[in-house]
Amino acid sequence: MSFFSFGQSAEIDVVLNDAETRKKAEHKTEDGKKDKYFLFYDGETVSGKVNVTLKNPGKRLEHQGIKIEFVGQIELYYDRGNHHEFVSLVKDLARPGEITQSQTFDFEFTHVEKPYESYTGQNVKLRYFLRATVIRRLNDISKEMDIVVHTLSTYPELNSSIKMEVGIEDCLHIEFEYNKSKYHLKDVIVGKIYFLLVRIKIKHMEIDIIKRETTGTGPSVYHENDTIAKYEIMDGAPVRGESIPIRLFLAGYDLTPTMRDINKKFSVRYYLNLVLIDEEERRYFKQQEITLWRKGDVVRKSMSHQAAIASQRFEGSAASESALEQAAKEESG
């Protein structure tokens, strides 16, 4: 998004060095549409060029400096004026002076920490962007370029199955079991439902995936529940001793990884909600939280690179430099 006013004498453009080869990812905008943005991971370098093009060649442009920023920020929709920045890096591209012809400036933000996943929700937005600015006395000329960040996880070591019971005394006793409690975004939820006692007439049964977004703290906490998926398990009355298998494929749904207490501003959690409806339209619920995580297409390469960067951050040693070189070889190979 660029901010131009009448009579402005230059335009700014931001171009990434690897724009032709870098992967793009779809991301939801505030109005619910999906756009494609360049995709980055934690620890990756962000580099490119800032092109300042004069609208009237030969006419000089005075400025108080030219800079580029890399920003990660959280915006709560009920507090629009305040942007909470958790990453803020600045590079000065030119000292105060004047430009007499169109110019290009190189920039590089090395091994940038991008701790959270990009997210656009009901009440909150977490975004990363580059902002190039020509600083002027009266009105700055600036251009923003959004990027998307995905956080990759490794396979969780502890991934126990979920077993639960739904019971209404002397009327209904159901056991249901899901194969695990942590699922990656392209996973399959496999489970089974056992009817141990059925004395009420159940006519419909479904599993819902519910996303719960929590924003704010203390007295001003907002919860937004959104039903992402409805999966019909059964239509008709079951009998005692029956078991019904469940296979729910997650890949087709618009899901994000579970986010817990992101920068003390918001959380996004997911729940499996078992719903039973009897012939008198009474509804019975049982809810269970599940954890969702993102498995990268190139997890091995990305994770080895990230691990090398992390070791360099903490040790700053020659050994970690060689680890980085090794990771780079793996990526090119």
Image: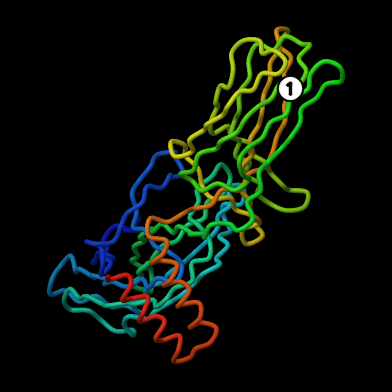
Is there any visible trace of residue 29 in the rendered image? yes
Name the spot of residue 272 as percent of width and height, x first: 63, 35
Image: 171 above or below 258: above
Q: Secondary structure at mark 1?
A: strand
Image: 227 above or below 215: above
Residue extending furthest toward the left: 58
Quarter that holds the N terminus: bottom left
Residue extending furthest toward the bottom: 318
- In this view of the protein, which residue sits in the foreground, 250 or 147? 250
- In this view of the protein, which residue sits in the foreground, 68 or 177? 177
Residue extending furthest toward the front: 241
Is there any visible trace of residue 12 in the rendered image? no
Q: Is residue 158 left or right of residue 145?
A: right
For label 1, the crowd category at 10 Å Cα-Cα, with few meaning under 14, some 14 to 19 and many 20 or more, is some
Image: 47 above or below 247: below
Q: Which residue is mark 1?
A: 284
Check disc 1 and give the amino acid type.
Answer: Tyr
Residue at x-position 60% and y-position 58% = 157
